[in-house]
Amino acid sequence: MTQTTYDFDKVIDRHGTCCTKLDGLDAMFGRHDVTALWIADLDFAVCPDITAALRHRLDHPVLGYSAAPDSYWQSIIDWQRRRHGLEITREELSFVPGVVKGIALALNYFTCRGDKVLIQPPVYHPFKMVIEGNERQVVENPLIVGDGTYTMDLKGLTETLERENPKMMILCNPHNPIGLQWSAETLAEVARLCRANGTIVVSDEIHGDLMLGDRKHIPFISVSDDAREVGIMLGAPSKTFNIPGLVSSWMVVKSPTLRAGFYHWLDVNEFNDPVMISTIGAEAAYTHGEPWLNQMLDYVAGNIKFVNEYLAANVPQVKAFTPEASFLVWLDFRQLGLPQDQLMSLLLNKAHLALNDGAMFGAQGVGFMRLNVGTPRCVLAAALEHIRDAVNTL
Ligand SMILES: Cc1ncc(COP(=O)(O)O)c(C=O)c1O
């Protein structure tokens, strides 16, 4: 059987689709006449099997209450086994209406107002927003920045756990915005330290299916008994298959002790009630989307190589951290020596690019910007030329 080849070079006009990346430009950046390479979705057409499954269901004229079929749950279980070697059971699995909402649900159930919750900046900014917005306290164990990569500060983690006694830690695995997959040893040490301290670990693994090259994703709950005891894993086909608009996230809790009250609470409040359209999209994606995903990841890896080579040859003052996962590139502008507002203005008003301001991810992100490379190469090439020309004006 010949395999379908998907076209990731095609430029698709997303205007008129209620697309946050474009329709949110004014609110976020104060102008909309710029190239949008910020929020983390892809500019690529989704796998046609997903749209076909949705279309097929919408051909039926009644859209009443719906129950997720067994085949939906099984598609998640099979995907985790096939892609990551992770065994999960139906009872360990729950639908959640979004990964950030899953974090918020766990935080609200397991912690109280005033409790401390640990994060490791620079990190995905809603972690801090959820903690502070729910009147909990943020405790930070920043990553250690090195030459071209970051490491987790395990000594700092040990001390912070002892000193601050956080009830919960929100782990990002792989870690957005840098695209780092934590090693099994690091994850096992996190689990050991957190279990010893009585700290629950919420592991956000939304980027876990997006491993590049021959890197493998290591789910937190796969590494040790400690991890299974303290871990709440969150995942979704949303980033993987570019269907975040369908909202199809899920959660896995291995420990019966953690699960019992929590899953009951989700159940009685109907927070775990799957949405019909999202289960259809998710099942089609997990069942038929793997060839699309593999080709998409090859394309994104090509884009990352392109960024590295372009910057090295044309803008050597700007360095890209090469991600191990996902389609986000953490760009280091520190050599330009600009204050953050001037750096942001250079990129927005001179390069006409909407990138995520590194400072969103914590004070440790000052001097950095996050570039979304999940876009056709011609768009990326033009954006890099704009960066070069803007930097040359300095
Ligand atoms: C680490 C991380 N978690 C969660 C999300 C958002 O997930 P959801 O839309 O399911 O809340 C993102 C999106 O960029 C992300 O990068």
Image (cartoon, grey):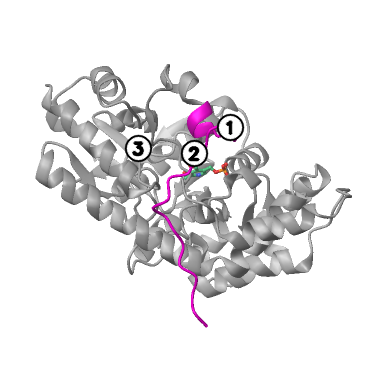
Q: Mark 2 belongs to which amino acid?
A: Asp
Q: Which mark is residue 122?
A: 3
Q: Which residue is drawn at 87% across and 50% down?
A: 61
Q: What stretch is highlighted in magenta?
A: 1-23
Q: Which residue lies furthest to the bottom in this view?
A: 1
C-alpha gap between disc 3 and disc 1: 33 Å
Establish if 127 lies above or below 254: above
Residue on which the image places disc 1: 16
Establish if 302 lies above or below 158: below
Please tell me whether residue 85 belongs to the stretch shown in magenta. no
Residue 354 shows up from this direction: yes
Q: Which of 189 and 38 lies nearest the eye of the viewer?
A: 38
Quarter of the image with the C terminus is: top left
Please tell me whether residue 10 belongs to the stretch shown in magenta. yes
Q: Mark 3 belongs to which amino acid?
A: Pro
Residue 247 position, x and y percent, is 64, 46
Residue 30 position, x and y percent, is 43, 16
- Mark before the other along the chain sequence, 2 or 3: 2
Q: Which of marks 3 and 1 is in front?
A: 1
Q: What element carries label 3?
A: loop
Quarter occupied by residue 216 = bottom left
Residue on which the image places disc 2: 13
Q: What element carries label 2?
A: loop
